[in-house]
């Protein structure tokens, strides 16, 4: 049985088993364990002809018709977990990856016909692989490969602990090809360049890609757009952005590239404006200036038309934009979370789509059909019913700034009673809360009979790029005031016990939790997950320091003042709030040392504080036992201090 250790206010180090079976479970643990369990749907991709959807549920692959008919499974020998499925241009084949179990990544590459589903092994990768796609003529597969890396690639994963002589060893993610006639694997892109996203050109002779030299985790923030010869690997720069770029897609005639550019704080959490640039290079043109939403994915659906998904005021939306005239037309907007699972989730002509649809009241399922007229295709979570209260899209004002977020009512809400309120600050900051199935956080809090609030302050997605850039050089300023005015607005409208207010968050949310308790004593308790406490020390120890330049304008060494005014450690003596601190010991995005600093400082100030360090976890906790403990322990902390607040006269 794995043990974890935590530090308490008594200065002693205590250890406890991460399993709860050795003693009577707490109320929080009992409620958490009673919540409905669902299967995770990892991907849903429609065939180019719009007739079938390939989807992955908990590592298992299946294909289902969009019209009618049963799904059929595709399996490989051995206990392998399948992922990253894609279709051939003629809709007759799929390609996918199969991961071996274990901490060191290794995978096999397969193709299968859509009709028989019999898989054919095409290669084996010793390292991390991703994004296999067929060439336009179907003769080759391209895929991203990080050869020999001892961990899964990506900044959220547990980092490799430092030991011995530290050099500049970098594991680059390279574009590689598999010749399907011979199953020959060839690494194509240069050895000193990290490729993030790519797409074949229509003639199959090149790719367009986002890429950067050096460390993949850090340098995504300075990636550029390139054309890469698919045979020689020769690279040609097409565009150097001001902000971050994602979702590169080439027009059907091969002459233009569309992409999303904007202020993004995390690779994979996309938001910005849609731009188009010529394949020959030159200036890029913004197709969506001043749009009051945040586009998140796109695909060409015609020679001059682009369809895109977007966050619209905290809701999901689909729209089109004309690549020449830049005319935006809304197709559908809904309060539920609708994730376009990949750029290939639209048929070739855009008339049919596949989405993973969910909301706070409905678990995720695969849906297919015309946009906004989808038909449910799967029932993998049919038995899951919400065990929490109603979710509402909540709006308020901070001066002249209109704001929104999501408020979940207590499960057993009764008018006339008063209830605790927990404020959940999302990560990012370039991200957003939405209405999705959430049994671990807001659903859990509601089931405990709390109000649960997730605000989208300035810096979030959903209201355009000016809003997303609203916290540049102002962390902890306007965004903090946005959150607090949201709390005040809720208190005016709902029966909140103001003595039982709680605050929690992870990553940027962990930073905001640490910052908030230096600015107010209104919260009875706080839970800071992977929080950032000291900008100066953080700059020197994190693995993704390039993210800070767009938000602060300079490094902490060149402009320490702009960081200092947003630095929790500069104001730590004002903290009175009992604080629980949670972090993975191999977190590269916000290293464990930041949490240790905050714990040390609060302990010195005689503030009730507890630090829990989860071994062999990164920025996100992947082990189910650790994830469970993370959420249960947080609510137990609130229960403890809410009880003490209620006992006060």
Image: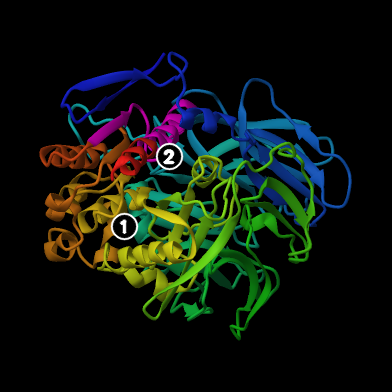
Which residue lies under the disc numbered 1? 547
Q: Secondary structure at mark 2?
A: loop
On screen, 499 above or below 285? above
Q: Residue at x 34, y 60 (%)?
A: 222
Task: From the top left corner, tell me how far across and down residue 422 is, in percent.
Answer: 42, 50
Instruction: Answer whether residue 615 is magenta in the image.
Output: yes
| Residue stretch in magenta | 609-637
Q: Secondary structure at mark 1?
A: helix
| Residue 460 as seen in the image, left or right of residue 534 | right
- Residue found farthest to the front: 649
Of 113 and 16, nearer the camera is: 16
Task: From the top left corner, tell me how far across and down residue 10 is, in percent.
Answer: 17, 26
Of callouts 2 and 1, which one flags the residue occurring earlier in the amino acid sequence?
A: 2
Q: Residue at x 78, y 58 (%)?
A: 374
On screen, 129 above or below 562? above
Instruction: Answer whether residue 62 is magenta in the image.
Output: no
Which residue lies under the disc numbered 2? 153
Q: Which quarter of the rendered picture does the N terminus lie within?
A: top left
Q: Residue at x 56, y 58 (%)?
A: 206
Residue 610 in sight in this render: yes
Task: From the top left corner, tell me how far across and down residue 282 is, in percent.
Answer: 44, 78
In this rendering, the label closer to the viewer, 2 or 1: 1
Task: From the top left corner, tell me how far across and down residue 454 is, in percent.
Answer: 46, 56
C-alpha gap between disc 2 and disc 1: 18 Å
| Residue 202 as seen in the image, left or right of residue 508 | right
| Residue 383 as seen in the image, left or right of residue 496 | right
Label 2 Cα neighbours within 10 Å, binned few <14 / some 14-19 / many ≥20: many
Q: Which mark is residue 236?
A: none
Residue 623 in sight in this render: no
Of 385 and 451, nearer the camera is: 451
């Amino acid at each position: 049985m794995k043990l974890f250790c935590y530090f308490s206010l008594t200065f002693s180090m205590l250890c406890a088993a991460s399993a709860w079976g050795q003693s009577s479970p707490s109320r929080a643990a009992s409620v958490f364990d009673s919540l409905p369990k669902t299967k995770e749907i990892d991907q849903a991709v429609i065939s180019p002809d719009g007739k079938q959807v390939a989807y992955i549920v908990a590592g298992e692959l299946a294909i289902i018709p969009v019209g009618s008919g049963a799904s059929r499974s595709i399996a490989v020998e051995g206990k392998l977990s399948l992922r990253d499925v894609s279709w051939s241009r003629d809709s007759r084949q799929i390609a996918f990856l199969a991961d071996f179990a274990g901490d060191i990544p290794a995978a096999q590459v397969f193709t299968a016909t859509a009709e028989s589903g019999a898989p054919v092994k095409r290669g084996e990768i010793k390292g991390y692989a991703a994004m296999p796609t067929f060439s336009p003529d179907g003769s080759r597969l391209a895929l991203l490969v990080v050869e020999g890396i001892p961990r899964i690639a990506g900044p959220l994963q547990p980092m490799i602990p430092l030991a011995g002589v530290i050099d500049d060893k970098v594991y680059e993610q390279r574009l590689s090809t598999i010749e399907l006639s011979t199953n020959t694997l060839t690494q194509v892109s240069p050895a000193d360049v990290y490729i993030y996203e790519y797409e074949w050109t229509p003639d199959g002779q090149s790719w367009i890609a986002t890429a950067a030299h050096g460390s993949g985790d850090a340098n995504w923030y300075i990636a550029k757009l390139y054309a890469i010869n698919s045979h020689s690997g020769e690279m040609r720069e097409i565009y150097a952005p001001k902000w971050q770029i994602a979702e590169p897609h080439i027009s059907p005639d091969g002459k233009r590239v569309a992409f999303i550019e904007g202020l993004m704080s995390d690779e994979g959490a996309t938001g910005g404006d849609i731009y188009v640039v010529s394949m020959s290079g030159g200036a890029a043109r913004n197709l969506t200036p001043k749009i009051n939403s945040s586009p998140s994915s796109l695909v060409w659906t015609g020679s001059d038309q682009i369809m895109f998904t977007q966050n619209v005021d905290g809701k999901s939306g689909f729209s089109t934009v004309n690549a020449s005239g830049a005319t935006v037309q809304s197709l559908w907007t809904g309060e539920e979370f609708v994730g376009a699972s990949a750029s290939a989730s639209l048929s070739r002509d855009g008339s049919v789509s596949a989405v993973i649809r969910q909301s706070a009241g409905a678990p995720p399922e695969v849906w297919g059909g015309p946009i906004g007229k989808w038909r449910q295709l799967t029932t993998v979570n049919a038995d899951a019913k919400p065990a929490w209260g109603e979710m509402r899209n909540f709006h308020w004002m901070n001066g002249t700034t209109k704001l929104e977020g999501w408020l979940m009512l207590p499960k057993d809400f009764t008018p006339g009673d008063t209830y605790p309120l927990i404020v959940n600050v999302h990560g990012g900051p370039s991200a957003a809360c939405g209405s999705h199935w959430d049994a671990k956080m807001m659903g859990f809090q509601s089931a405990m009979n709390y109000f649960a609030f997730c605000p989208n302050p300035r810096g979030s997605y959903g209201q355009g790029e000016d809003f997303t850039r609203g916290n540049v050089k102002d962390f902890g300023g306007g965004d903090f005031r946005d959150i607090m005015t949201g709390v005040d607005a809720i208190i005016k409208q709902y029966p909140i016990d103001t003595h039982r207010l709680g605050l929690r968050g992870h990553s940027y949310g962990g930073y905001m939790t640490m910052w908030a308790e230096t600015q107010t004593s209104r919260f009875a308790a706080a839970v800071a997950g992977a929080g950032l406490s000291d900008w100066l020390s953080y700059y020197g120890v994190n693995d993704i320091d390039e993210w800070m330049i767009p938000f602060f304008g300079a490094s902490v060494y060149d402009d320490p003042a702009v960081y200092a005014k947003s630095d929790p450690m500069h104001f730590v003596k004002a903290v009175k709030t009992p604080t629980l601190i949670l972090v993975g010991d191999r977190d590269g995005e916000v290293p464990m040392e930041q949490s240790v600093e905050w714990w040390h400082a609060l302990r010195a100030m005689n503030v009730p504080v507890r630090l829990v360090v989860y071994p062999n976890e990164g920025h996100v906790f992947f082990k189910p036992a650790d994830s469970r403990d993370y959420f249960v322990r947080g609510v137990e902390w609130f229960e403890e201090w809410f009880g003490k607040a209620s006992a006060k006269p």
